[in-house]
Image (cartoon, helix red, strand yellow):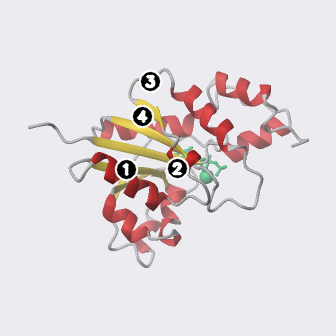
């Protein structure tokens, strides 16, 4: 009998992708014995409308650059190519229909994202179609998740990862202020962002 596919999906804006994302994905790969982790950059973000987000194409390409050397990582254009506002639940349902009922799907998030997942569109349907993995992240208390109303029914696996207090918001601010970003994200991603002037003050 063929082994069931175990597929991890790492969703994010990735503006830009950084070592916090890569470490969480690598830990999920190993801790949950996944066949691969697919990074899924959002297209039109449903939730981050309060700031200008770099184009989906730039965010997609930075994610490709960051993951290129890892044979167990891939990047999907599914959300980037979908017109209109993106919902994770639609993506997971589409992956379910592509890979069939036998595949085991895992949606990987950080502690902050899992804490507001209950406010997402159809979070219970999302939890039906995949297993949610919540990675520890400095500054966010995973223990709070269980106490939230609505959390009881959701299957969430907690995952301890090496603590990296890195965020894309901080990196964008550092670039704008000309403070260092080296060692926070892959150098080639930083160079891509610089070359395309993604996070300068003027933008
Ligand atoms: P922003 O500051 O723009 O929100 P971010 O650093 O939070 O960027 P996202 O693209 O929003 O990055 O995150 C994608 C996913 O990765 C989310 O589930 C988030 O919780 C998780 N994540 C991001 N940074 C870390 C980190 N340092 N450790 C663990 N998980 C993280
Ligand atoms: Mg975030």
Element under disc 3 = loop
- Sequence-wise, the earlier of marks 4 and 3 is 4
Identify the residue shown where x is 72% and y is 23%: 191
Q: Quadrant of the N terminus?
A: top left
Q: Which residue is mark 1?
A: 95
Element under disc 1 = helix
Label 1 neighbourhood size at 10 Å, few (<14), some (14-19), many (20+)? some
| Nearer mark to the viewer, of 2 and 4 | 4
Residues marked 4 and 3 touching at CB (< 8 Å): yes
Q: Is residue 141 visible?
A: no
Which of the pair 59/155 is nearer the observer? 59
Residue 193, image x, y percentages: 74, 31
| Nearer mark to the viewer, of 2 and 1 | 1
The CA distance from mark 4 to mark 1 is 21 Å
- Sequence-wise, the earlier of marks 1 and 3 is 3
The CA distance from mark 1 to mark 3 is 22 Å
Relative height, residue 129 to residue 58 (above, below): below
Which of the pair 83/67 is nearer the observer? 83
- Mark number displayed over residue 70: 3
Element under disc 2 = loop
- Mark number displayed over residue 137: 2
Q: Which residue is mark 4?
A: 26
Identify the residue shown where x is 75% and y is 61%: 50
């Amino acid at each position: 009998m063929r082994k069931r596919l175990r597929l991890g999906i790492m969703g994010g804006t990735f503006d830009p992708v950084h070592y916090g994302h890569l470490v969480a994905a690598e830990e999920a790969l190993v801790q949950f014995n996944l066949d691969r982790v697919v990074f899924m950059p959002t297209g039109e973000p449903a939730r981050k409308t309060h700031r200008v987000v770099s184009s989906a194409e730039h965010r997609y390409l930075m994610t490709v650059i960051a993951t290129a050397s890892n044979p167990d990582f891939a990047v999907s254009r599914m959300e980037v190519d979908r017109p209109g506002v993106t919902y994770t639940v639609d993506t997971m349902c589409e992956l379910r229909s592509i890979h069939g009922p036998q595949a085991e799907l895992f949606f990987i998030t950080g502690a902050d994202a899992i804490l507001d997942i209950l406010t997402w569109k159809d979070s219970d349907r999302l939890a039906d179609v995949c297993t949610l993995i919540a990675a520890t992240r400095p500054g966010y208390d995973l223990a709070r998740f269980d106490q939230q109303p609505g959390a009881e029914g959701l299957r969430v696996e907690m995952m301890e990862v090496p603590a990296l207090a890195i965020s894309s918001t901080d990196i964008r601010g550092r670039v704008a202020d000309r403070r260092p970003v080296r060692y926070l994200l892959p150098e080639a991603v930083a160079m891509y962002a610089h070359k395309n002037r993604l996070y300068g003050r003027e933008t």
